[in-house]
Structure formats: structure tokens, C-alpha cells
Image (cartoon, rainbow, N blue to C red):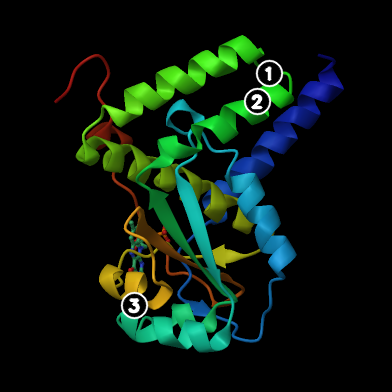
Amino acid sequence: MTISSSQAQTEKNELFFNVLEERRSVRKYDNTAVISDEEIRELIAIATKAPSSSNLQPWRFIVVTDAELKAKLLPIAYNQEQVADCSAVIIVLADLEMYKKVDEIYSSAATAGYVTEELKDRMIANTTKQYMALPAERLKEIAVFDTGLVSMQLMLAARAKGYDTVPMGGYNRAQVVELFNINERYLPTLMLPIGKAATPAHPTTRLAVDQIAFFNEMK
Ligand SMILES: Cc1cc2nc3c(=O)[nH]c(=O)nc-3n(C[C@H](O)[C@H](O)[C@H](O)COP(=O)(O)O)c2cc1C
């Protein structure tokens, strides 16, 4: 790597760190701001570069842009105004039977030339067997964990595009399931309003690294 290209790389990294610093939970949104479906698709495509267990990608998304539907989310989210005022609410769901897409996933890897046909068939058989043998509680743990990873990437991708977000667990899950008639295979994990801030987020602090990170031991 030449000096100038490594400098360019350092500058790119700095921009990434700025995005990390700038993501804050915004709760007041400009209710006139619109984000196109296309842009939301693009954000989701970037976010789904997230890693997942066996690359099973157990995340699903309901994108709510319709004003009437957003208004219906308001009481479900205990009247947290951001769900009505933001441009879109993305409801992140965990697919508790994610292994059922294994065929599609490894076939696409084979089509792309990343695995041989033989390896693809072996991966499909092994993964299906392995995941089907897992207790439901473990499958849920895996799926929920992976939706956390994709949600984080979604928030950072949104910030990099100039949008704000707030991750929300404060909503009535049963009512979301009822509103969208969601099959029990899918578990709503996070509600994620996205839009343009009308008021900046309030600052927050973090625990000191020495209180949370222990080298070569657990304190
Ligand atoms: C799983 C989860 C659930 C959350 N639920 C809510 C919520 O229902 N309403 C809300 O205003 N903020 C919610 N938050 C945002 C946190 O309060 C916020 O991330 C935290 O205070 C740190 O602030 P920051 O995001 O601005 O750095 C949630 C965050 C997470 C990760």
C-alpha cells in the first residue's frame, strides 16, 4: 500500500468512527421528511451485510411508511411520539425457523461460484439437521441475537446516509403481532423509527472501559 492510499484508508476509517459517534437515539422527528422506499431498501441491503449464525440471516423487516398505520403504532408503542413523526418505522423480526431458507441461501452461494455443488448439498443437509435438532429456546436465542446485529448495522447505515434512528423495545409485542397478523414463526424484536431529527438526541454517557473489560480474567 502506498503512503497516500494508506492515508486515504485512514481518512475513510475516521469517517466511519464519526458515524459511530454521531448515532444517537433521536426521539423528535421532522414529520414532513420522506424517505423513499428505494432508499429504505438500499439501507436494508447494506445492513444485511451483517454476520449471522451459519449465514442463515434470520431477520425480516416490516417497513411502515403509511401515516395511518404509523398512527396505529402510537398506542402500541405506549404513545412514544417518534413512531408517528418519523419517516418510517422498521419493525425487525426474528425468523424462529430460519433454517428453512438454507436451500435458498446455499444455492445462491453456489450460483455465485462461492461453493461447489457438492459442498452446497452437504451444507444444506448438515445445517438443516443441526438446526432442526436444536431446542426452540436456542433457535430463538440465535435468531434474536442476529436481529440485534442487523439492527445495529441498520442504525449506522441510516446515520451514514444522514438519517436518525432510535431502537425501541418499548412496545406491546402482542399488539404488533395482531396488527400485522404475524405468523408465530416470526418474533418482533425491535421497532426502529427512522427519519430526520427535529431536535437533537440528548447526550448519554457510557461505563468506563475498566469497569466492563477484563483482560485475561473475569472480575
Ligand atoms: C433494545 C433497546 C430498546 C430500547 N427501547 C427504547 C424505547 O422503547 N424508547 C426509547 O425512547 N429508547 C429506547 N432505547 C434507546 C436507549 O434508551 C438508548 O440507546 C440509550 O439510552 C443510549 O443512548 P443513545 O442511543 O443515544 O446512545 C432502546 C435501546 C435498546 C438497545
Estimate the spatial distance between the alpha carbons at disc 2 and disc 1, rounded to whole Å.
5 Å
Q: Please tell me whether mark 1 sits on a helix, a strand or a loop.
A: loop
Q: Earlier in the sequence, mark 2 or mark 3?
A: 3
Residue 69 in the image, given as x and y percentages of width and height: 49, 83
Of circles 1 and 3, the one toward us is 1
Q: Which residue is mark 3?
A: 77
Residue 130 is drawn in which quadrant?
Answer: top left
Nearest the camera: 68 or 120?
120
Three-letter amino acid code at the position of disc 1: Tyr
Per the rendering, the mark at residue 98 is none
Ligand number 1: quarter of image = bottom left
Q: Is residue 189 left or right of residue 154?
A: left
Estimate the spatial distance between the alpha carbons at disc 1 and disc 3, rounded to whole Å.
43 Å
Q: Quadrant of the N terminus?
A: top right
Estimate the spatial distance between the alpha carbons at disc 2 and disc 3, rounded to whole Å.
39 Å
Establish whether ligand 1 lies closer than 8 Å to the Cβ of label 3.
yes
Tell me which residue sits at (66%, 30%) in the image. Answer: 108
Question: Could you tell me if the residues under marks 2 and 1 are in contact, i.e. CB atoms within 8 Å?
Answer: yes
Residue 134 in the image, given as x and y percentages of width and height: 25, 30
Q: Which residue is mark 2?
A: 109
Three-letter amino acid code at the position of disc 2: Ala
Residue 149 in the image, given as x and y percentages of width and height: 45, 42
Q: Which residue is mark 1?
A: 114
Three-letter amino acid code at the position of disc 3: Ala
Q: Residues within 10 Å of mark 3 (few under 14, many from 20)?
A: many
Establish whether ligand 1 lies closer than 8 Å to the Cβ of label 2.
no
Q: Earlier in the sequence, mark 2 or mark 1?
A: 2
